[in-house]
């Protein structure tokens, strides 16, 4: 599999992002390997909090949250999905499928051998992370979901999502940093916008970011639909602590929190949160507050 690797120089002097890089190689599915990057902060023998990003962000999204969680005594791990951040970027859009993303991140998870893990996931971090929970629930002690879902294509997607999908395929230059800015409530500095653009020196690095919107199941016969239905069956008996922490200003995922609360037994009795004045990327708008929500969730459930 052909891939690009963003030069390290692109990641110099990013605001609030001075974490040491960590790498593992994962099977690319064609007999080769790809390098996957992740943040790994806090005590290495500490019980992990796994932060999973979505589209078109990377672990830079979690820079405001790491310290607050580490200060509580936890190990914090935030991978960059293949095609994003400091991870390798296959060059062909056909290399990216729902199954290939699951294969790559699943390989990484098993190599890391994470146990007693609290998952926090947003956007595609949920579409992938919740599939990991469904497949290997024994690895996870609890889950916090925000502005995400696990679509099966059995219901109509929102107009907001369809508009985003159309934009992502038609815009001549895929403006990663500006996409993040358009989905936050707060005004981002130019250096932060540049931080989101940093992994992509030119358009050839953006095959994964371009392809992700097309991989969301929006019809009942999508290749991933049945697997996601099966994952919902597993989540419907998941009785470990499960918290929703959606924001109030995200038109794409609005209402998804109540669906989780209805479907997942582990939601019962939890202090579910609605983050005020948070956009789709609430980690950017309310990162420190969200870190506090995760820490409190761990304390409340003795995780």
Image: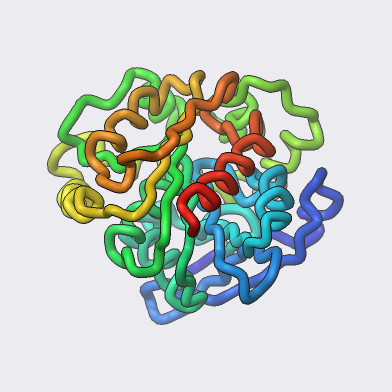
Nearest the viewer among 216 and 46 is 46
Q: Is residue 138 visible to the viewer in this orientation of the structure?
A: yes
Q: Please indicate whether residue 149 sits to the left or right of residue 79 in the image.
A: left
**Scheme of colours in the image:** rainbow
Task: Give residue 181's position: percent from left, percent from top.
Answer: 64, 26
Query: In the current view of this chain or complex, which residue is farthest to the bottom?
Result: 31
Establish if 23 lies above or below 248: below
On the image, the x and y values in percent for residue 257 come to 36, 31
Residue 33 visible somewhere in the drawing: no
Q: Position of residue 23 (x, y in %)?
A: 63, 72
Residue at the location (40% across, 46% down)?
A: 126
Looking at the rendered structure, the number of numbered marks drawn on it comes to 0
Q: Residue at x 32, y 64 (%)?
A: 137
Q: Establish if 257 lies above or below 112.
A: above
199 or 293, nearer to the observer: 293
Where residue 208 sits: x, y (%)? 48, 50
Q: Is residue 61 above or below residue 234?
A: above
> Image quadrant of residue 150?
top left
Residue at 43% x, 42% y is: 145
- The image quarter containing residue 1 is bottom left
Q: Quadrant of residue 196?
A: top right
Which residue is at a point 74% across and 61% down the rendered structure image?
A: 7
In this rendered view, identify the residue nearer to me: 57 or 116: 116
């Amino acid at each position: 599999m052909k891939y690009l690797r963003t030069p390290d120089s692109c990641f110099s002097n990013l605001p609030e992002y001075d974490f040491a890089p960590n790498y593992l190689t994962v099977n690319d599915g064609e007999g080769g390997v790809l390098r996957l990057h992740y943040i790994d902060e806090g005590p290495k023998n500490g019980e992990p909090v796994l932060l999973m990003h979505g589209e078109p962000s990377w672990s830079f999204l979690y820079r405001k949250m790491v310290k607050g969680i580490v200060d509580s005594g936890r190990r914090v791990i935030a991978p960059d999905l293949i095609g994003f951040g400091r991870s390798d970027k296959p060059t062909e859009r056909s290399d990216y499928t729902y199954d290939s993303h699951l294969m790559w991140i699943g390989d990484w998870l098993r190599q890391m051998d994470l146990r007693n893990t609290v998952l926090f996931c947003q956007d595609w971090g949920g579409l992938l992370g919740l599939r990991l929970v469904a497949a290997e629930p024994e690895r996870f002690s609890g889950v916090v979901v925000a502005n995400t879902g696990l679509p099966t294509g059995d219901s109509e997607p929102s107009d907001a999502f369809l508009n985003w999908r159309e934009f992502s395929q038609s815009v001549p230059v895929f403006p990663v940093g500006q996409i993040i800015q358009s989905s936050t409530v707060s005004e981002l500095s130019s250096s932060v916008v540049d931080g989101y653009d940093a992994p992509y020196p030119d358009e050839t690095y953006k095959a994964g970011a371009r392809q992700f919107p097309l991989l969301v199941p929006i019809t009942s016969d999508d290749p991933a639909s049945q697997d996601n239905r099966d994952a919902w069956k597993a989540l419907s008996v998941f009785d470990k602590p499960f918290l929703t922490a959606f924001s109030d200003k995200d038109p794409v995922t609005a209402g998804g929190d109540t669906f989780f609360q209805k479907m997942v037994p582990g939601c019962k009795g939890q202090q579910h949160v609605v983050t005020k004045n948070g956009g789709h990327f609430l980690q950017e708008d309310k990162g420190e507050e969200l870190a506090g929500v995760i820490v409190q969730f761990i304390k409340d459930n003795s995780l």
